[in-house]
Image (cartoon, rainbow, N blue to C red):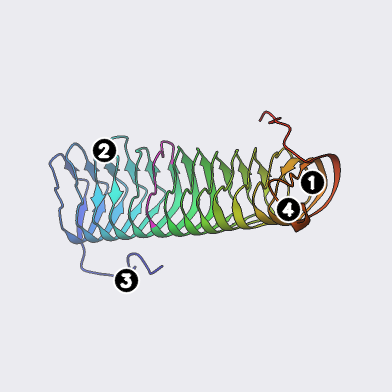
């Protein structure tokens, strides 16, 4: 990702300490430093702008940064009314911002978020490409839908259905508490992270977890080319159904059901279900102490 806004000195106009109430007050402006300004009622205050630095200040109304390019925002507050705030832009960087509005960040190319908290992040970060997240805290459903080329470090998500339909994702040192996380994804690598939530990563391809803690009911099913390396999965049940899998698990599983092919190593599998009418048991290698072996599903779904 290229440098968002150059630190080299430019002939920028400084707008400082102003308060705006009208529609589109700075429409189409370029080469500005907007410092400690408040944008109150009035839509689209910085629409179609280019090469802008925003320092401090507040955005309190809708659509503050649409169709913007080469933007850096630092220490700025986005109130609840600033919903759907940053759409259709290119090369944007946000640092140390307090974002209270939902549906932010859509259809952007080249986005950096650092030291950001979004407590109402429902339907945030959709259809974005080339994204970097560091020290970002998210609370809300449907985070990061249909994104491409995302790298995240120390990301916290508390909300269901995150990263649905994404491609080329790398996540490190993060915590995701999310039902239906990583559905319909391709090329995902998660390292040194914790993932809690049922139905993890269904209908996906090329999914890798390395040194992670995973707890999931019916997780990691319908996955093509699934790798689970040096992970802990205590409390997980009915895993790996119809998945091609290579799994090295450092503790125990409650149950495994009908993996399609590959190898699963674990200390213990309490219940192993291999139904020859559904899969070919000869195509899966199990290296674990197994307490109960069944040739068909017994209908028991453990409670979370």
Residues at badges 2 and 4 in contact (C-beta under 8 Å)?
no
Q: Given this view, does label 2 or label 4 mark the residue nearer the observer? A: 4
Q: Given this view, does label 1 or label 4 mark the residue nearer the observer? A: 4
User: Residue 202: x percent and y percent?
Assistant: 56, 47
Give the CA distance from mark 2 to mark 4.
Answer: 59 Å
Residue extent of the magenta highlight: 118-128
Query: Total number of numbered labels?
Result: 4
Which of the marked residues, 4 or 3, is nearer the chain's N terminus? 3
Q: Residue 280 shows which numbered tag? A: 4
Which of the marked residues, 2 or 3, is nearer the chain's N terminus? 3
Which of the marked residues, 3 or 1, is nearer the chain's N terminus? 3
Give the CA distance from mark 1 to mark 2.
Answer: 49 Å
Give the CA distance from mark 4 to mark 3.
Answer: 64 Å
Q: Residue 8 shows which numbered tag? A: 3
Asked if residue 228 can be seen in this view, the reply is no
Residue 7 lies in what quarter of the image?
bottom left
Residues at badges 1 and 2 in contact (C-beta under 8 Å)?
no
Q: Residue 251 shows which numbered tag? A: 1
Viewer-nearest residue: 199 or 75: 199
Which of the marked residues, 1 or 4, is nearer the chain's N terminus? 1
Q: Quadrant of the N terminus?
A: bottom left
- Badge 4 marks a residue whose secondary structure is loop
Tell me the residue at 45%/38% (across/down): 141
Secondary structure mostly seen in magenta is: loop
Q: Given this view, does label 4 or label 3 mark the residue nearer the observer? A: 4
Few, some or many residues within 10 Å of mark 1 (<14, 14–19, 20+)? some
Give the CA distance from mark 1 to mark 4.
Answer: 26 Å
């Amino acid at each position: 990702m290229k440098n968002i806004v150059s630190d080299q000195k430019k002939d920028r106009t400084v707008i400082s300490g102003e308060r705006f109430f009208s529609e589109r007050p700075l429409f189409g402006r370029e080469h500005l430093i907007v410092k400690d300004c408040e944008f109150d009622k009035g839509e689209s205050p910085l629409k179609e702008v280019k090469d802008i630095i925003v320092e401090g200040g507040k955005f309190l109304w809708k659509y503050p940064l649409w169709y913007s390019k080469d933007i850096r925002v630092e220490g700025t507050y986005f109130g609840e009314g600033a919903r759907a705030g940053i759409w259709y832009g290119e090369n944007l960087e946000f640092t140390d911002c307090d974002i209270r509005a939902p549906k932010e960040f859509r259809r952007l190319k080249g986005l950096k978020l650092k030291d950001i908290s979004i407590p109402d992040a429902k339907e945030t970060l959709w259809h974005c490409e080339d994204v970097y997240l560091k020290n970002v805290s998210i609370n809300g459903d449907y985070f990061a839908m249909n994104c491409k080329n995302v790298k995240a470090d120390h990301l916290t998500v508390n909300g269901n259905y995150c990263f649905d339909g994404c491609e080329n994702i790398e996540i490190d040192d993060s915590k995701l508490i999310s039902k239906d996380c990583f559905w319909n994804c391709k090329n995902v690598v998660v390292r040194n992270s914790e993932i809690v939530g049922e139905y993890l990563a269904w209908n996906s391809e090329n999914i890798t977890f390395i040194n992670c803690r995973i707890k999931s009911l019916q997780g990691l099913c319908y996955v093509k080319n699934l790798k689970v390396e040096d992970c802990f999965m205590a409390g997980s049940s009915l895993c790996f159904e119809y998945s091609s899998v290579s799994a090295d698990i450092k503790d125990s599983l409650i149950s495994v059901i009908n993996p399609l092919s590959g190898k699963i190593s674990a200390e213990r599998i309490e219940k192993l279900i291999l139904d020859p009418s559904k899969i070919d048991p000869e195509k899966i290698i199990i290296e674990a102490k197994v307490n109960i072996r069944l040739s068909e599903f017994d209908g028991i779904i453990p409670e979370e």
